[in-house]
Amino acid sequence: MTPERVARAKRLGILPIANPPFLFFLGDPVVEMLERRVTEQGFPFRTLWNAGFPLSFGSDAPGYYPVDPLRDLGTAVAHQTLSGQRVSASEVLTRREALRSQTINAAYTSFQERTLGSIEVGKLADLAVLGDDPLTFAPERFQELPVDITIAGGRIVHTGAVHTPVGIAASGTAVCSCAHR
């Protein structure tokens, strides 16, 4: 994305939605067909973030690629394709920026920031409890992060092989036995 296009999008109040699955699944053939010079402008996650856009991620699902928010987070951080080729290393996001893009910014760009995007009183309890720390986990392996619990609408809808010190009460409520409580 050229600096002129970034400035124009900013001036017009456009909310660009980055699409990590395109980088992951199409990055290899795009580099092969259009050469690296073109791809340097094709996945401008860092450029958009630095320009002050509330960057969030899309997937074009259902129908095109398997939905995998963890893979998409890792792709935004590692900027690697399906083959492991690193494309546009200067356009990577930090883990925290990618998490913000997938949560708070996604709620904002879908005009749902009052009810989604962060864990706060009065918001819907839609969240996943991961079995490892996404701030230290290797981004190219994010799709392997274990999901211990998924909560949607305040109700537990999925439990995996629990790796964290959380149990499930008979009521279906997650109970934390963490040392920080």
Image (tube, rainbow, N blue to C red):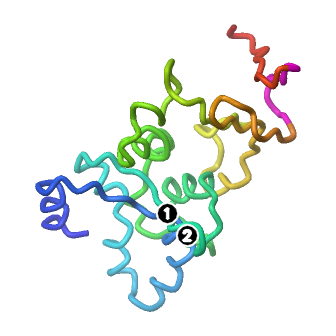
Judged from the image, the secondary structure of the residue bearing numbered disc 1 is helix
> Is 49 on the left-hand or right-hand side of 171?
left
At label 1, which amino acid type do we have? Answer: Pro
Judged from the image, the secondary structure of the residue bearing numbered disc 2 is helix
> Is 45 on the left-hand or right-hand side of 57?
left
Q: Which residue is mark 1?
A: 20
Q: Position of residue 151 (x, y in %)?
A: 68, 35
Residue 54 vs residue 144, the one in the foreground: 54
**The magenta stretch spans which residues?**
162-170
> Any magenta on residue 168?
yes
Q: Residues within 10 Å of mark 2 (few under 14, many from 20)?
A: many
Question: Relative to residue 157, is residue 86 depicted above or below?
Answer: below
Which residue is rendered at x = 54% and y = 66% of the image?
80
Q: Position of residue 145 (x, y in %)?
A: 72, 47
Which residue is rendered at x = 52% and y = 78% of the image?
26
Q: Which residue is mark 2?
A: 24
Residue 56 vs residue 82, the one in the foreground: 56
State which quadrant residue 136 falls in: top right
Which residue is rendered at x = 68% and y = 10% of the image?
180
Q: Position of residue 69 (x, y in %)?
A: 59, 53
Residue 100 vs residue 30, the one in the foreground: 100
Q: Report the number of discs.
A: 2
At label 2, which amino acid type do we have? Answer: Phe
Q: Are marks 1 and 2 in contact (CB under 8 Å)?
A: yes
Quadrant where the image shows the C terminus? top right
Q: Residues within 10 Å of mark 1 (few under 14, many from 20)?
A: many
